[in-house]
Image (tube, helix red, strand yellow):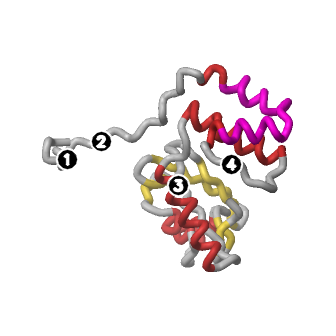
């Protein structure tokens, strides 16, 4: 990045996870200690970690779960901005339509092998950094491969079982 805030063509490094807090080695012991705390003590712990009163009608079990998350978040970092945006997007979609079926946005790591049997023949597809390899040829999408195998227009993710026809599989 240059002084004026524009990139100079070099790729910016991906944001790395927050380094562990100095007390991270104690994290497991702190989370384990929650198990022996009564409801009053859990509420005190909540006030200490969240700087607010705990929800009034929250069970001890749920307070333990929320507190365990917070302790780990403090030690290792929270959700990435991308994950937070995805969760907000899903919440908005479900608020607008409770029957919303999210589609999986699957990106495979290089080396992943997808297998599908079609008409008694097993077909294997290798994922790489730039797409997919099937029978020695490079393809940009699974749909191209599904079309080549079946001779008809198929959704590649549906053909390989990553999505039911017309809707996503549960995430």
Marks 2 and 4, Cα distance to the nearest angstrom? 41 Å
Task: Verify CB contact (< 8 Å) between mark 2 and mark 1.
Answer: yes
Q: Say which of 119 and 133 sits in front.
A: 133
Between disc 1 and disc 3, the foreground one is 3
SS class, disc 1:
loop
Give the Cα distance between marks 3 and 2: 21 Å
Earlier residue among tags 1 and 4? 1
Mark nearest the camera among 1 and 4 is 4
**What residue is disc 3 on?**
84
When the figure is inspected, residue 94 is found, relative to residue 6, above or below; the finding is below
Residue 35 image point, x, y percent: 83, 32
Q: Nearer the viewer, mark 2 or mark 4?
A: 4
x, y (%) of residue 47?
67, 41
In primary-sequence order, the first of circles 1 and 3 is 1
Q: CA distance from mark 1 to mark 4?
A: 45 Å
Disc number for residue 145:
none
In the displayed structure image, the side of residue 130 where residue 158 appears, left or right: right
The residues tagged by marks 4 and 3 sit, at their Cα atoms, a distance apart of 24 Å
Q: Which residue is mark 2?
A: 12
From the image, tell me which residue sits under label 4: 53
Q: Earlier in the sequence, mark 4 or mark 3?
A: 4
Within 10 Å of disc 1 (Cα), the crowding (few <14, some 14-19, many 20+) is few
Dot placed on the residue nearer the N-terminal end, 2 or 1: 1
SS of the residue at dot 4?
loop
Q: Quadrant of the N terminus?
A: top left
Disc 1 designates what residue?
Answer: 7
In the image, which residues are magenta? 27-47
């Amino acid at each position: 990045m240059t002084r004026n805030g524009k990139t100079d063509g070099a790729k910016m490094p991906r944001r790395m996870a927050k380094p562990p807090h100095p007390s991270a080695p104690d994290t497991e012991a702190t989370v384990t200690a929650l198990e022996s705390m009564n409801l009053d003590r859990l509420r005190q712990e909540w006030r200490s970690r969240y700087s607010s009163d705990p929800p009034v009608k929250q069970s001890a079990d749920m307070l333990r779960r929320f507190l365990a998350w917070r302790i780990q978040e403090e030690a290792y970092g929270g959700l990435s901005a991308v994950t937070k945006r995805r969760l907000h997007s899903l919440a908005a979609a479900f608020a607008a339509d409770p029957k919303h079926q999210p589609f999986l946005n699957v990106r495979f790591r290089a080396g992943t092998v997808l297998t599908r049997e079609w008409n008694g023949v097993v077909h294997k597809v290798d994922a790489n950094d730039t797409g997919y390899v099937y029978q020695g040829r490079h393809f940009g999408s699974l749909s191209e491969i599904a079309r080549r195998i079946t001779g008809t227009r198929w959704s590649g993710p549906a053909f390989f079982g990553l999505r039911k026809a017309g809707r996503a599989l549960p995430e």
